[in-house]
Amino acid sequence: MKMRNKARIGLRSNLEGYLFISPWLLGFFALTGGPLLFSLYVSFTNYNITSRRDWIGLSNYSEMFFQDTLFWKSISNTLWYVAVGVPFSAIAAIAVSALLSQKVWGGGFFRMLFYLPTVLAGVAMYMLWMQMLGPQTGLINTVLRFFGIEGPSWLTDPAWTKPSLVLMRLWGIGTSMLLYLSAIHSVPKQLYEAAEIDGAGRIRRFFKITIPMITPIIFFDVVTTMIGAFQVFQEAYVMSENGAGGPASSLLFYNLHLFNEAFVDYRMGYASAMAWFLFVIVMIITVINMTASKYWVHYEGGDHR
């Protein structure tokens, strides 16, 4: 009898839970699930909006891997941006949060100062950075010229376009900075006191106590930032020549190439194949990150899961 009552209570609890999330489930299946399945089907056709959808099997994927040279260029650009931009922004956010965690006068003002850029609209921010990165009159090169350094042509030299976007990425580390700042403040004070009694200096305490204790937040930030970096689009579209990824396709990121195929050339079938390939890549890398996290992410209870 008791087992039946427990099962009944459990079933009722599950039904109540599904009832509460039913609006989201309905929205997902009606507005997201349907288009997802449709795009998967379209990826095996030559659909271009105006014509009928003829089944062509794996032809889109074959063209993507073996015929489209811009596909590999966009892949290399995106991987470069992910490999350089994600660690660079994470390290910068951790460093800034560590500095702002100190009890100094005006700390709240500087926290606000670092967070404010994150509330700016995307396109407006990119236009501002295009002015700042101007080779002759831009603020950055003007400051470098003051110190006797001739700055590069940031957005017109293919060798400097992607580093320009990585530099610009530092402008938006405010959200990550707040996450790290709250994690640092939640580290038990007795750990620092014990380490200080044992003679550990400030730098040693930071690397031996602070960093291990905030690894769950580092893991969360790196995974979410990496997923976002694979989908970089707005920056390249606004800041490249005519939204085509120039100069010399140095800003032709994967999502920009996908956009051009879908909404410039109207090759929806091919663009859908590209979208599903990106989904698979992001899923594989996320699974690898989740698997590797047990070797470096440390939770307070000692459980890596």
Image (spheres, grey):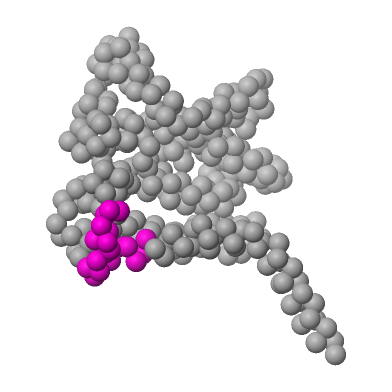
Please report the residue visible at 28 percent of the width from the left and 63 percent of the height from the top.
53
The residue nearer to you, when weighing 100 against 240, is 240
Residue 47 placement, left or right of 187: left
* Residue 265 picture location, percent across and down: 23, 46
254 magenta-colored: no
Dominant secondary structure of the residues highlighted in magenta in the image? loop
Report which quarter residue 189 is drawn in.
Answer: top right
Residue that protrudes farthest toward the bottom in the picture:
1
Image vertical order of residue 70 relative to residue 280, above or below = above
Q: Which quadrant holds the C terminus?
A: bottom right
Q: In the picture shown, does residue 143 fall above or below 268? A: above
Which residue is painted at 76% across and 71% down in the image? 13
Q: Does the magenta stretch include residue 46?
A: yes
**Nearest the eye: 24 or 246:** 24
The N terminus: image quadrant? bottom right
Q: Is residue 273 above or below residue 265?
A: below
Residue 176 percent across, percent down from the top left: 54, 39
Q: Which residue shows up at 25% across the image and 57% down it?
A: 51
Residues in magenta, as a range? 39-57
**Residue 106: horizontal and vertical position, in percent?**
65, 20
Residue 119 occupies quadrant: top right
Q: Position of residue 108 (x, y in %)?
A: 65, 25
Name the foreground residue: 40 vs 175: 40
